[in-house]
Image: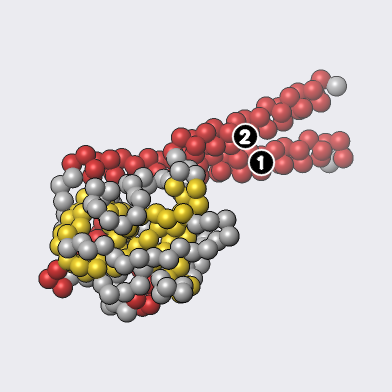
Amino acid sequence: MSRSGATPLIGWVFALVLIALFCMLGSWQLGRQHAKQAMLDSAALALSSRGPQALDAAADAQRNRAHEWAAGNGRFADAPAVLLDNQQRGGRPGLRVYRAFLPEHGRGPLLVDLGWLPVPPDRTIPTIGPAPDWSHVQGLLAPPPAAGLVAPAIQPQADGSLLVMALDPEAIAAVLGVPTLAARVLRADPALEGGYPRDLELLANTLPPERHLGYAVQWFGLALAVLVTALLLTFRRKRR
């Protein structure tokens, strides 16, 4: 094959590789959109019905990705607070405060999200007060915030609290001295008095579904642009 004949072939191979890559990225963004929309729909259904599950539902392995309203009695464990870093609220950086709650009748403990605290620019971790005097808790059972590729390192603070980059139930349970922790956490009802500023917003720290859809359209648009460009260049070359 002559050099002039090989050039269009090389160009088409390069174009097809780009098209495949852009389509893969667009499909991934569509998958993220559907997953997050399903999560929002699940949470909306739980919040609209508010038919409470028992707190031990948090440890049900068959439902560890579901969103359910739960309520029950118990007490907070005599253990340090767990501070999840890199959590935004209203566009401000901060952290979420969790404490282990022991449901009554000896059921396994779970982490309760007590709310959000800001972190100043100098990254001084705020001092955490004692746990609220709650004998009854209610709220939204949900999977822990996604950690991505962050390692679940645990950093003890001066006040005894534990700063973490990701909520790893097994690692945190070992440090807290409890046998196990439920896979889901309880987002405490904002109506409960005490704790810290909180809401039941699920996507405060990540992109909403419509943003993923927008990115998917962009990737598919780039794939189409590459295809059209390759066709035009081929057509012009044949005319010459």
Q: In the figure, is residue 147 to the left or right of 115?
A: right
User: Viewer-proximal residue, 56 or 234?
Assistant: 56
Quarter occupied by the N terminus: top right
Report which residue position mark 1 lands on.
Answer: 18
Quarter occupied by the C terminus: top right
Is label 2 in contact with label 1 (beta carbons under 8 Å)? yes
Relative to 83, residue 199 above or below: above
Question: Is the residue marked by circle 2 packed among few (<14), some (14-19), or many (20+) residues within 10 Å?
Answer: many
**Regarding mark 2 in the picture, which secondary structure is present there?**
helix
User: Viewer-proximal residue, 103 or 27?
Assistant: 103
Q: Amino acid at mark 2?
A: Ala
User: Viewer-proximal residue, 176 or 226?
Assistant: 176
Furthest-top residue in this view: 239
Quarter assignment of residue 61: bottom left
Q: In the figure, is residue 106 to the left or right of 117?
A: left
Give me the residue at 26% from left, 62% from top: 132
**Regarding mark 1 in the picture, which secondary structure is present there?**
helix
Report which residue position mark 2 lands on.
Answer: 223
Give me the residue at 81% from left, 40% from top: 6
Q: In the figure, is residue 136 to the left or right of 80?
A: left
User: Viewer-proximal residue, 127 or 157?
Assistant: 127
